[in-house]
Amino acid sequence: SLQKTVASLLNFTQTTTTMMSFRRSCLLSLVAFVAVEAFAPNSHHRPTTTCLFEAVENETEAPIATAARTVSVPLSFDQMCRQVASAMKEAAMEQGQKKQIVRLLLPRDATYGDLGKNIEASSTPQDRNSASTEQISLVPPDESWQGGIMQLYRAASPTAQEIMQTVVSDTAGGLPPRIQEDRTVDESGVDGVGLLTTDDNQITCWLQPMQENVNAICQMADNTDDDDDDEPNNNIVALINPQWRLVDDALDTASKSEGFLGGLANFLGGKGGAQKQLKDSGFKPVYTLEGYVCRGNNVRLLQVLDSEWCVFCERDDGESFVPVGSTPTRPTYQEVDQMLGDSDIGYKYERDFG
């Protein structure tokens, strides 16, 4: 009798546990369904989004014409270097802007998802002739780089050297100049800062400078202004991929204010004081190319000299970009999202799942 009672209790317990597991599974499924419906776009947009985005994939690459100039996003490492060199030369020779700020993407092996692989070796200018176009991607200098700031430096240094050689070679003709690399400006040795100078001193590039380098940068730029040189393309001082971000956080915003609060914010790492110092010294952006992901799509933001900020969205084939709009000032993430919506470009997962 006792054994029957125990067996009945065990059977009841197993049945109850099974029912609870079933109810829990149903409840989780219901919550997941509600979450997807709440955050996904309205269903009546899905067919239109997919069809329109597929339709423009058959069109040719279209640049964006702004009031100042027509710009197009570079599709290869060589195109990007030529664009940057052209902007630097035009700024120096035609506008007299020799103190320049450049932000660009960096070359990386397309198989960068393979952890532990040396992924910047085949993307250097010396090796790009032996590497196919499919092996090299232009990637934003963000947290996706496995090796951090030093890996960024290993990709940025040959990129900067290629740009410097293009600027001087196209202007003077003949053989490209020799470039000297000075790593002593990186006191710790691991902050990813370098100083590149052509042997004729026509171009000096601070590579990935930090806020701590701003005093030295401005002093060098002031010394350049004191030099007597009639060549219009000489004595360019450029900052390539500064380590401070374009967007402001709360500390950056506070550091731009006057008084004790602004001084404290600058002391704690706000970039307002450094930016003001560079602006007072005469530094201006001449080329800015950045990228991030919006709605699951790779987005590129591009400004060249006095052009507007132009926004491009990568096509699904990954080989070209669709222009989606432009703004006089740098667009926010929300504005870019709105541009994609206005261009009937929806979430990438919708197209992936049909």
Image: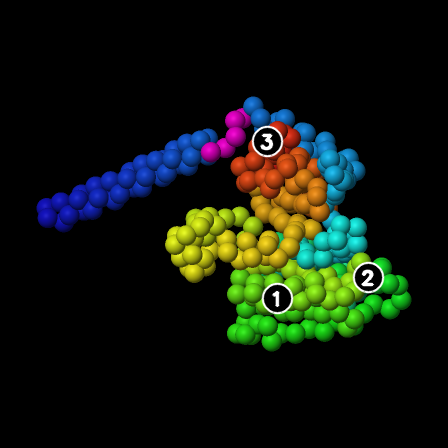
> Which range is magenta?
39-43
Quarter of the image where one finds residue 84: bottom right
- Of residues 185 and 278, the one nearer the viewer is 278
Residues marked 1 and 2 touching at CB (< 8 Å): no
Tell me, for residue 14, which label it has, or none.
none
Mark nearest the camera among 3 and 1 is 1
Q: Is residue 45 left or right of residue 131?
A: left
Seen as rendered, the residue at the extreme right is: 174
Quarter of the image where one finds residue 104: bottom right
Q: Which residue is mark 2?
A: 231
The residue tagged with tag 2: helix, strand or loop? loop
Q: Which residue is mark 3?
A: 341
Cα–Cα gap, marks 1 and 2: 21 Å
The residue tagged with tag 1: helix, strand or loop? helix
At horizontal 61% and vertical 29% (from top left) the residue drawn is: 342
Image coords of residue 269 (percent x, y): 45, 59
Seen as rendered, the residue at the extreme top is: 44
Quarter of the image where one finds residue 115: bottom right
Q: Amino acid at mark 1?
A: Gln
Q: Amino acid at mark 3?
A: Gly
Cα–Cα gap, marks 2 and 3: 48 Å
Q: Which residue is mark 1?
A: 219
Q: Amino acid at mark 2?
A: Glu
Q: Is residue 80 left or right of residue 219?
A: right
- Magenta stretch holds residue 345: no
Image coords of residue 137 (percent x, y): 69, 55
- Circle 1 packing at 10 Å, graded few (<14), some (14-19), many (20+), is few
At horizontal 74% and vertical 39% (from top left) the residue drawn is: 68
Mark nearest the camera among 2 and 3 is 2
Q: Is residue 123 left or right of residue 274?
A: right
Cα–Cα gap, marks 3 and 1: 46 Å
